[in-house]
Image (spheres, rainbow, N blue to C red):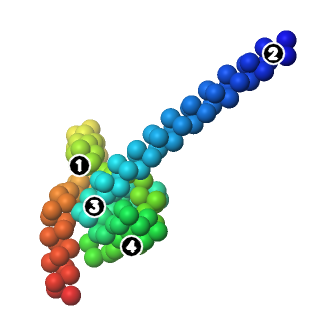
Amino acid sequence: MEILLFGLLAVLLVFMIFNTRKRTKQMKAEQEEKATKTVPGVKVLLQGGIFGTIVAYDPEDLDTPALVEIAPGTIIEVHSQAILRIVEPKDAVDDAIAADAIADDVVADDVIEVETAQVVETPEETRARLERDADNK
């Protein structure tokens, strides 16, 4: 009976080790992918729920704060691990479609103002705007 319990314990330990290794590799791959995609001009979501655009980011030195523009002319420093994910352009399109759907569902008697979605800049447009702003200062 004791041999059976030790065998079961050994199987569970082996399973835990392999599962932990697999998860660690997956997390490392996700971090490397995020580091390669995080370039100036890319729109990101911070862990606090704030959307912004990367102004400066050093993927080699993660202790150096990343500079994120949260509004035109408003740049904040955040820790590199505060960047939750890269916001793909399709997310902004989905938000615009949802806003249009809400506007279409409004009954004519009820007047509700719906704010339209902002036009999303491409990374190249953001870089060009930031360079113009730096030249003007």
Residue identified by numbered label 4: 76
Of the residues tagged 1 and 2, which is closer to the observer? Answer: 2
Q: Which amino acid does label 4 sit on?
A: Ile
CA separation in Å, label 3 and label 2: 56 Å
Residue identified by numbered label 1: 89
Q: Residue furthest right?
A: 2
CA separation in Å, label 4 and label 2: 60 Å
Residue 78 visible in the shown view:
no
Circle 3/circle 2 CB separation < 8 Å: no
Of the residues tagged 4 and 2, which is closer to the observer? Answer: 2
Residue identified by numbered label 3: 39
What residue appears at the point 34 percent right and 74 percent down from the top-left corner? 75
Q: Which amino acid does label 1 sit on?
A: Pro
Q: Which amino acid does label 3 sit on?
A: Val
User: Residue 128 versus residue 22: which sits nearer the camera?
Assistant: 22
Residue identified by numbered label 2: 3
Of the residues tagged 3 and 2, which is closer to the observer? Answer: 2
Circle 3/circle 1 CB separation < 8 Å: no
Circle 4/circle 1 CB separation < 8 Å: no
Classify mark 4: residues with Cα within 10 Å, few (<14), some (14-19) or many (20+): some
| Quarter assignment of residue 122 | bottom left
What residue appears at the point 71 percent right and 24 percent down from the top-left corner? 10
Classify mark 3: residues with Cα within 10 Å, few (<14), some (14-19) or many (20+): some
